[in-house]
Structures are given as structure tokens and as C-alpha cells.
Image: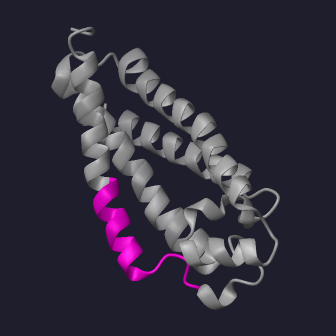
């Protein structure tokens, strides 16, 4: 079961990479909502994007990505793995989300954003690094605790229904 859950975490992380690739397909400025406020302000000042577009891109990605992410997670844990009860659902969801978080922290933030030019927005190069040491620490903490909280909340809600 552990190898299956690891594979599912890798699949969920791959979905996250795919959503990021989709989001920046016409330039990283379309996902500037993930950047610091100073980068967003510079992009608006330079005429690369408007505040309304930033808001709309953010909402659009949340409408697309979040349901797909949760649906895939629930499919893995409850439909494919047959989780029953709180603990069974919790540990599987936490492990899958933790692995996806590792992909996000190491693969996306650490390598893709930090060591390639793919996420560079013209005119904001002087504002790099886009993800500083404080951001990284916060993302590690919130990603780990957030994975646990989401897994506990979903398992708590669904465990009475899937005994």
C-alpha cells in the first residue's frame, strides 16, 4: 500500500506541475498572483497586466485546479485504495499531499522558479529571488501543517460515511 500511496502523491504532484505549466503557457506574468506584491505592482506599472486580470487569473486557477486536485485525492484514497474510517483516510491523504508538497517545494519552487528563467517576468529581474528564504520557510511549514489539516478535515467529514 505504501508504494501505491507514493505513486499517487507523485501523480498529484504531477497534476500541480501541469496546472503551473498551463498557467504560464503564455508567460509567467499570468501567474503573477503567486509572486510578492512588489512584483505584481511592477507588472501593473509596466503595463504587462492589470489588477483585474491578476484577480481573474487567480480565481480561474482556483476554480480549475482545486476541484481537480481534491477529486483526484478522494478518488485515490477512497475509491481506489478503499480507505475506511478516520485514520485510514487521514494517513493516506496526508502522505499523498505531503509528497505533492515536496514536488512543489523542491521541484517547482526550488528548481523551476529558482534556477530557470521560465518564471522570470521581464522588467522584474531586479526583484529576484521571487521566493526568498523567509518564503521558503513559511511554505514548508504551511505546506506540511496544511497537508495535515486538510487530511484531518476531509477524513473527519468522510469517515462516518465510509466505515
Q: Position of residue 69 (x, y in %)?
A: 51, 35
Say whether residue 117 is visible: no
Say whether residue 11 is visible: yes
In magenta segment, residue 74? no
Of 99 and 158, the residue lying toward us: 158
In this picture, residue 147 sits left or right of residue 65: left
In this picture, residue 59 sits left or right of residue 83: right
Q: Position of residue 103 (x, y in %)?
A: 47, 57
The quarter holding residue 88 reads: top left
Quick check: 153 above or below 55?
above
Residue range of the region highlighted in magenta in the rendering? 128-143
In this picture, residue 92 sits left or right of residue 62: left
Q: Position of residue 134 (x, y in %)?
A: 36, 78
Q: Residue at x 52, y 36 (%)?
A: 66
Q: Residue at x 68, y 47 (%)?
A: 56
Q: Residue at x 57, y 68 (%)?
A: 35
Quadrant in which the N terminus is drawn: top left
The quarter holding residue 41 reads: bottom right
Q: Residue at x 39, y 81 (%)?
A: 133
Q: Position of residue 122 (x, y in %)?
A: 78, 80
Residue at the bottom extreme, as displayed: 126
In magenta segment, residue 129? yes
Quadrant in which the C terminus is drawn: top left
Please tell me how many numbered marks the rendered image carries: 0
The quarter holding residue 42 reads: bottom right
In this picture, residue 6 sits left or right of residue 84: right
Of 7 and 157, the residue lying toward us: 157
Amino acid at each position: 500500500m505504501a508504494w501505491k500511496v507514493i505513486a499517487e502523491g507523485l501523480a498529484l504532484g504531477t497534476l500541480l506541475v501541469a496546472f503551473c505549466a498551463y498557467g504560464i503557457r503564455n508567460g509567467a506574468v499570468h501567474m503573477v498572483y503567486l509572486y510578492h506584491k512588489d512584483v505584481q505592482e511592477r507588472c501593473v506599472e509596466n503595463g504587462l497586466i492589470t489588477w483585474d486580470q491578476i484577480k481573474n487569473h487567480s480565481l480561474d486557477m482556483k476554480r480549475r485546479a482545486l476541484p481537480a486536485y481534491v477529486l483526484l485525492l478522494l478518488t485515490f484514497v477512497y475509491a481506489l485504495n478503499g480507505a475506511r474510517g478516520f485514520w485510514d483516510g487521514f494517513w493516506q491523504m496526508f502522505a499523498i499531499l505531503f509528497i505533492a508538497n515536496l514536488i512543489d517545494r523542491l521541484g517547482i519552487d526550488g528548481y523551476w522558479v529558482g534556477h530557470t528563467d521560465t518564471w522570470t517576468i521581464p522588467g522584474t529581474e531586479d526583484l529576484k529571488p521571487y521566493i526568498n528564504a523567509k518564503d521558503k520557510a513559511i511554505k514548508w511549514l504551511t505546506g506540511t501543517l496544511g497537508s495535515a489539516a486538510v487530511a484531518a478535515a476531509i477524513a473527519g467529514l468522510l469517515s462516518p460515511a465510509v466505515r
